Amino acid sequence: MTKTKNYRGLRLSLHIIIAILAGFLCLYHTTILYNLFFGASNEAVSTLLTLQALFRTCIIISSIFVIFGNRKALWGMWASISLLIASQYWSYFNNTDVFLESSRNAFSYLRGYIIPSVITLLRLFTKP
């Protein structure tokens, strides 16, 4: 019985960590969306930023489903994060001056894969 209790405790703690990380993704992208549309900047929102806002909204929605344990939402999370990073690379290599994209290192956008990777690895250790 102690193995079962230990396994349940481990599984619960993994779910809590997943919920915290996915919640962080939701909070981070919600904050960026808020600053984009309601922030102090009075600049017009470009088409690229609107497209990125759509990808960020998809990240938020899929992260909420990940918090509630939907395994298929991981696919949506990965797809939307990949699309967001692809749009950031497009902006970087086409020299668009969106949030000073040109001043960043080209590899800095890959850090967007860190939290989804941890969430996916932790989800592998939790059985449905």
Image (cartoon, grey):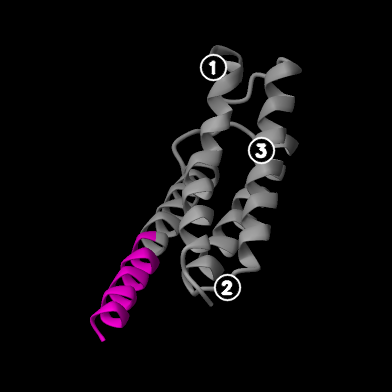
Residue assigned mark 1: 104
Q: Residues within 10 Å of mark 1 (few under 14, many from 20)?
A: few
Q: Position of residue 105 (x, y in %)?
A: 55, 15
- Mark nearer the N terminus (1 vs 2): 2
Q: Which kind of residue does numbered mark 3 sit on?
A: Leu
Any mark on residue 49, and which? 3
User: Given this view, does label 1 or label 2 mark the residue nearer the observer?
Assistant: 2
Q: Position of residue 76 (x, y in %)?
A: 67, 59
Q: Residue at 61% across / 18% down in the picture?
A: 106
The stretch of residues the image draws in magenta is 1-17
Q: Quadrant of residue 60?
A: bottom right
Q: Position of residue 126 (x, y in %)?
A: 47, 69
Proximity of marks 2 and 3: CB atoms separated by less than 8 Å: no
Helix, strand or loop status at disc 3: helix
- 29 part of magenta stretch: no
Residue assigned mark 2: 70
Left or right, residue 121 beside residue 6: right
Helix, strand or loop status at disc 2: loop
Q: Which kind of residue does numbered mark 2 sit on?
A: Asn
The secondary structure that dominates the magenta segment is helix
